[in-house]
């Protein structure tokens, strides 16, 4: 057996294992470069204000501080059918790099050369923040989601995927944007300094760190709906993008009205966040239902049993299965179990898409073959990781021996 089981995405994509796609490397390099340029523009603001590097040196760690926890939260919500980490990394990089840099340039040009000269400083800032910035920023963030729909449609299996990708884009964008906000708070002459910086950090970094993910999730939902329809439903993408712009503009507009405006804005965004959580819970139940409905038809392959299906339909049992595998064969066995769980879940979702006509016969046949192959390879990889003469404890989810323990004895 080859080591292809170590790279399940290679099996799914039909490429040699262990070889990172050149397009991904180039994409990450471009997004990283754009992020560095955006940070360089923010840093010059510190020096222009005569404060040296101090504001930037303070602002950057503050912007980075909540990011690991927020990314971990997004990944925690994506446990049942985890998206490829490369796709998530690129989505985050797009938000932090290409989207953030382009928005910074376009928004600044709009403010300096269009709205302020035409409407004056106060009205110009209000119009730019309420109507200009939301259109620019949500369009730029949404482009990567539309790109996923165009090039990686098979990876978008429902509303959860749309929300997860949107959240990663939004977190990346907010991280870079917050650096500029924190620097501006520190160097603002009439009311700046540590006090305003602290207030801004609490407002943007602690109280409302999910704003950009919430906005862009509207586009994500539209993209997810389009991916689930045979004709693509481009109107859903446009509607989702419009909803993202409206939410973004509502927040920006209300937040300029002081405490009362902020309270109203928070109430609206809290309601939207609750609605997104309800969608995530409902979609998880949908996927569990598909696992229970679609996978029994594959028991004849010998790759799955009733007990295995029950394990796959529970996040708790999945976690126990990985822990059991790790206890028997170490991290390699646990990785094989994770590959098996992912492939089986993807198989159920692909079967559902084929039943609805979203995947045509040939596309589904190819995907079905690759997923069944991954399940078989993962089982063999698990068996190879188990010591030949070691006693094997029964699988915690199985009433009898499963394919995993059977393979171990026959390997």
Image: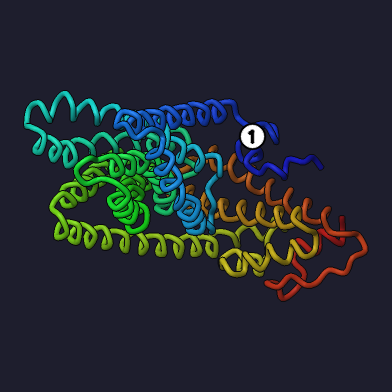
261 relative position to 239: left or right: left
Residue 125 visible at all: yes
Q: Residue 311 or 269: which is nearer the viewer?
A: 269
Q: Position of residue 195 (x, y in %)?
A: 29, 53
Identify which residue is drawn at 69% across, 46% down.
373
The residue wearing badge 1 is 14
Q: Please tell me which residue lies in front, 169 or 162.
A: 169
In the rendered image, the residue lying farthest to the bottom is: 399
Instruction: State which quarter of the image contains the C terminus.
Output: bottom right
Q: Is residue 402 above or below residue 68?
A: below
| Residue 214 visible to an observer of this rendering | no
| Relative horizontal placement of residue 116, taking residue 20 as reference (left or right) | left
Residue 193 vs residue 56: left or right?
left
Q: Position of residue 105 (x, y in %)?
A: 29, 27
Q: x and y percent of residue 403 in the render?
A: 75, 62
Which is nearer the eye, 99 or 39? 39
Seen in the picture, residue 30 relative to 82 is either above or below; the reply is above
Q: Is residue 188 above or below residue 103?
A: below
The percent position of residue 23, horizontal first and vertical second, equals: 54, 27
């Amino acid at each position: 057996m080859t080591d292809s089981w170590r790279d399940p995405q290679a099996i799914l994509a039909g490429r040699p294992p262990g070889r990172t796609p050149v397009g991904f490397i180039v994409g990450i390099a471009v997004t990283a470069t754009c992020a560095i340029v955006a940070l360089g523009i923010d840093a010059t603001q510190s020096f222009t204000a005569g404060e040296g590097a101090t504001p930037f040196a303070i602002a950057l760690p503050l912007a980075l501080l909540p990011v690991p926890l927020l990314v971990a939260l997004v990944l925690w919500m994506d446990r049942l059918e985890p998206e490829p980490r490369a796709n998530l990394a690129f989505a985050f990089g797009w938000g932090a790099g290409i989207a953030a840099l382009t928005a910074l340039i376009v928004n600044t040009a709009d403010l300096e050369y269009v709205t302020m000269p035409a409407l004056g400083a106060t009205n110009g800032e209000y119009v730019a923040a309420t109507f200009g910035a939301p259109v620019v920023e949500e369009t730029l963030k949404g482009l990567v989601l539309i790109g996923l729909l165009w090039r990686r449609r098979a990876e978008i299996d429902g509303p959860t995927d749309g929300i997860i990708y949107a959240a990663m884009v939004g977190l990346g964008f907010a991280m870079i944007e917050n650096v500029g906000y924190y620097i501006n708070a520190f160097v603002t002459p009439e009311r700046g300094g540590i006090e305003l910086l602290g207030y801004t950090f609490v407002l943007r970094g602690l109280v409302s760190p999910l704003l950009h993910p919430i906005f862009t999730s509207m586009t994500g939902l539209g993209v997810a709906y389009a991916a689930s329809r045979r004709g693509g439903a481009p109107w859903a993408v446009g509607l989702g993008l419009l909803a993202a712009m409206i939410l973004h503009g509502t927040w920006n507009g209300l937040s300029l009205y002081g405490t009362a405006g902020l309270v109203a804005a928070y109430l609206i965004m809290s309601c939207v966040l609750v609605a997104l959580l309800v969608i995530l819970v409902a979609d998880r139940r949908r996927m569990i239902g598909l696992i229970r409905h679609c996978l029994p038809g594959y028991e004849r392959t010998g790759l799955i049993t009733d007990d295995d299906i029950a394990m796959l339909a529970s996040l708790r049992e999945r976690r126990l299965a990985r822990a059991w595998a790790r206890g028997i064969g170490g991290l390699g066995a646990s990785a094989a179990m994770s590959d098996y769980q992912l492939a089986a879940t993807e198989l159920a979702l692909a079967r559902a898409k084929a039943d609805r006509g979203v995947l045509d016969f040939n596309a589904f046949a190819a995907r079905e073959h690759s997923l069944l192959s991954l399940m078989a390879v993962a089982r063999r990889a698990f068996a190879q990781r188990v010591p030949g003469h070691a006693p094997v404890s029964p699988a915690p989810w199985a009433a009898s021996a499963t394919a995993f323990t059977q393979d171990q004895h026959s390997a």
